[in-house]
Image (cartoon, rainbow, N blue to C red):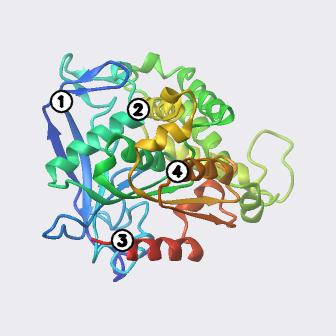
Amino acid sequence: MNAPHDPSSAGAVLAQKAHFDAPLKLRGGAELAAYDIAYETYGELNAARSNAVLVCHALNASHHVAGFYEDNKSNVGWWDNLVGPGKPLDTRRFFVVGSNYLGSCFGTTGPASINPASGRPWGADFPIVTVEDWVEAQARLADRLGIERFAAVIGGSLGAMQALQWTLSYPERVHHALVIAAAAKLSPQNIAFNEVARQAIMTDPDFHGGHYYDKGVVPTRGLRIARMIGHITYLSGEAMAEKFGRLLRRKHLGFDFDIDFEIESYLRYQGDKFSTYFDANTYLRITKALDYYDPAGDFGGNLSAALARARAQFLVVSFKSDWRFPPSRSREIVRALLDNRRIVSYLEIDAPGGHDAFLLEDPRYHSALRAYFANIDL
């Protein structure tokens, strides 16, 4: 993570919010009469409006992609190692947009927002949202910013699903798509992990059917367990062994149920921290959006047929240690694109970071992204 004075930092940034009054019909049948989208921008939009890049975030991130806030310099963007002047996604050349998805708890309208119909937080009444809904909302934000076509849309994990969907929902509005650490749909195992996490939240006594705001409580225990489950899947066995091994927190085994191993301490710390800033209703909806995403679903499971609409050029990146979204799932996307004679580059990196590797500063990974962005014609 770069210090705020680092010349390669995007510097002090300003979170912005766009309000929309035009109703948004959601894929599940519900409709949002009005909504806000939180976003940030880095760099300058050129005169031709041809240098915009949309960054789509994963489950627990936000629109705060790079830089820091003047009143909180320690709050550095989640992909700050990638975005900034002289970095692989160079803000001296590109106008980068970070957009927060619908249903989030970081500024965009979500379950904790006020429902205009009741004057109280939406809570459990907030509708289920999908990847397709997010792309539709992002397209409206792009219209507001005067961006007719993105030079590139990029994301990792759930963000990569959004990047892929952009090429299907708006094929003429995307020149390049960078799809990183992704799958075109979740495996049954991944859906299972999400369901266990949701059950941990929904069975917490403080959940109150999703209307815990009215009770002045938070389903902290459920959120903690959900986050601990997630972290186990984000790391590879190799990374976990290298970072923690079987190191003891205490000098000797306690023969109790307090913390013995460093890995236990790490998971509890991550769970505790997560429960202080993330909304449980948001977690439920975002994991459902992950579960539901399947562009081949309307094509009899034929991914090649589903991706026939795409017109963008692609870079697909996977990591060998990522057992949650393994390289085989990325290669499925590559094969489907090649079936449609799309221009696609594929990079498979032997890095130990597991699924979280897409967030790390691996030199091979960053060099490839730097080269790819440098070759995008504006």
Marks 4/1: CA–CA distance = 36 Å
Residue 1 visible within the image: no
Specify the label residue 226 is tagged with: none
Which one is earlier in the sequence, the residue at label 1 or at label 3?
1
Judge depth for marks 4 and 1 and give the one in front: 4
Q: Residue at x 55, y 53 (%)?
A: 338
In the image, residue 166 sits, relative to residue 46, either above or below, namely above
Numbered disc total: 4
Which kind of residue does numbered mark 4 sit on?
A: Leu
> As drawn, is 234 to the left or to the right of 102?
right
Marks 2/4: CA–CA distance = 23 Å
Marks 4/3: CA–CA distance = 19 Å
Quadrant assignment, res 374:
bottom left
According to the picture, the residue beneath numbered tag 1 turns out to be: 34
Which one is earlier in the sequence, the residue at label 3 or at label 2?
2
Which kind of residue does numbered mark 3 sit on?
A: Ile
Looking at the rendered structure, the secondary structure element under dot 1 is loop
Q: Residues within 10 Å of mark 3 (few under 14, many from 20)?
A: few
Q: Residues within 10 Å of mark 2 (few under 14, many from 20)?
A: many
Marks 3/2: CA–CA distance = 30 Å
According to the picture, the residue beneath numbered tag 3 turns out to be: 376
> As drawn, is 294 to the left or to the right of 53?
right
According to the picture, the residue beneath numbered tag 2 turns out to be: 130
Judge depth for marks 1 and 2 and give the one in front: 2
According to the picture, the residue beneath numbered tag 4 turns out to be: 337
- Looking at this view, name the residue that lies furthest to the bottom: 7
Residue 71 image position (x, y, % from top left):
26, 63
